[in-house]
Image: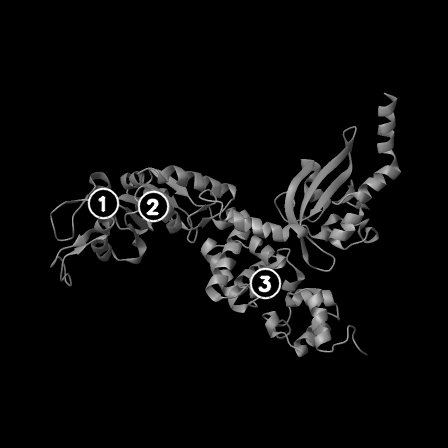
Amino acid sequence: MPETKNSIQDILDPNFARLLLESMADGVFTLNDKGEITSWNPSMERITGYTAAEAIGKSCMFLNFNQCFSKTCPTGIGECGIFQHASVDAKECFLRHKDGHDVSVVKNARTVREKGAIKGVVETVTDLTELQKARQKAEEANLRLGERHKFENIIGKSHPMQEVFSALDAVAASETTVLIEGESGTGKELVAGAIHYNSERKNSPFVSVNCSALAESVLESELFGHVKGAFTGAARDRSGRFEEAHGGTLFLDEIGDISPFIQLKLLRVLQEREIERVGESRKRKIDIRIIAATNKDLYGLVKSGSFREDLYYRLKVFPIHLPPLRKRKEDVPLLVSDFIRFQNQKTGKQVEGISQSAMRILMDYAWPGNVRELENAIEHAFVLCDARGSVNIFDLPVEVRQFALTNNLRQPAALKVVPATSRPASIKKLTRETLLEILEESDWNKAEVARRVGVSRTAIWKYMKKWDIPLKRTL
């Protein structure tokens, strides 16, 4: 018993507690019940660049954490939610370093109570900077872990995509009709192809038809074929896509756009597995699997009377919903890594990756065009970025950067509105004269200049040395 008592006394000793905090690799700081920082260990100084003297007495808002309780940092401790939730568990986010760059961290927070009363908050911050290269390699490995995380050309490890992969695993081994639902750009055709090429029909044709791209009469002939003389211009017999897909899979994209007449003919095919060419009464047996896709609310179309209810239920035997990219932001780094790898192969460049500031913008952007828009954004960035550098903020499409500005997202200071003549589109356009202009505008603050240009402060120093620009304004 005495030994236990002495051990507890040692732990409660203030000097021991101080030494314990100073020896921790993780950053630790505490807040009082008003949300003011009351302690700040050396690791927090290393991670943030702010000394204890600079931090104590301030709110943690000055660190610009971009995530607290699944939202951006609030305006005060009263809106934070920590006192209501009592904890924040292992949330990965960014904080803003003193010199302006973003630091990737994991934060935890707990309220401290005594006899039920809240005394304050203790927060820990784990620096992930040293893990970035290892993480990139791990992400690339995750892309190739097999059918679970990369089902053919589909990339994702988020929970919504895990559910998609589970559905694909189940349905690929069956002959069931599948309806793929999802917004434009979510990869519906990739999913249809994955189902086919992982099924027993993989050695037979996979035929795709975009139903919204053709007029009714043209679509009818395209799907069912026609005989010579069936209509003006029908100079010979022609088999349709149903016959071409015999033994394999027919993918009907944008099925919600087909006319009532085509809906009726498709219903008969699903019921009888027979087709008739246009202008012919002969029935032809077909052995196909049908996969349909739509970016519309088919059930809503059924209720409005513009889509047949019986056809809807024939198609929706096994529905698969593809989540929009904004609902699976965890997959954005994986997709970016794969698109950069692809563009390197395509262009011959050796782009190493993407800056944390640019990645933060990609993570915050809503992606109305989904994965297709993200892929196009990376292709756009490759036109501007250095062949051996990395993708930075000003390589991204203007609408992506403008979204961050108009929605007041917590982005690096590089996104501050500055005169177009003083902000280069990319580092390769930076000249001595432009650099001098930005230095003047920034009151010769090198960190601010670095943020505007989109490079590190060290790079600015090198340019100043190269062009014989003094480190301080000359009078």
Left or right, 167 with reference to 314: right
Of the residues tagged 2 and 1, which is closer to the observer? 2
Q: Evaluate if marks 2 and 1 touch, with contact meaning CB atoms under 8 Å apart.
A: no
Q: Look at the numbered disc 1 and give the secondary structure of its residue.
A: helix
Q: Quadrant of the C terminus?
A: bottom right
Q: Position of residue 53 (x, y in %)?
A: 84, 52
Residue at 82% across, 40% down:
20
Circle 3 sits on which residue? 390
348 shown above or below 332 = below
Residue at 14% across, 57% down:
237
Of callouts 3 and 2, which one flags the residue occurring earlier in the amino acid sequence? Answer: 2
Of callouts 1 and 3, which one flags the residue occurring earlier in the amino acid sequence? Answer: 1
| Closest to the observer, 154 or 293 | 154
Left or right, 274 with reference to 174: left
* Residue 175 quadrant: top left
Circle 2 sits on which residue? 196
Circle 1 sits on which residue? 264
Q: Is residue 303 visible?
A: no
**Kind of residue sitting beneath label 3:** Ser
Q: Is residue 114 visible?
A: yes
Q: Look at the numbered disc 3 and give the secondary structure of its residue.
A: loop
Q: Position of residue 361 (x, y in %)?
A: 58, 57
**Kind of residue sitting beneath label 1:** Leu
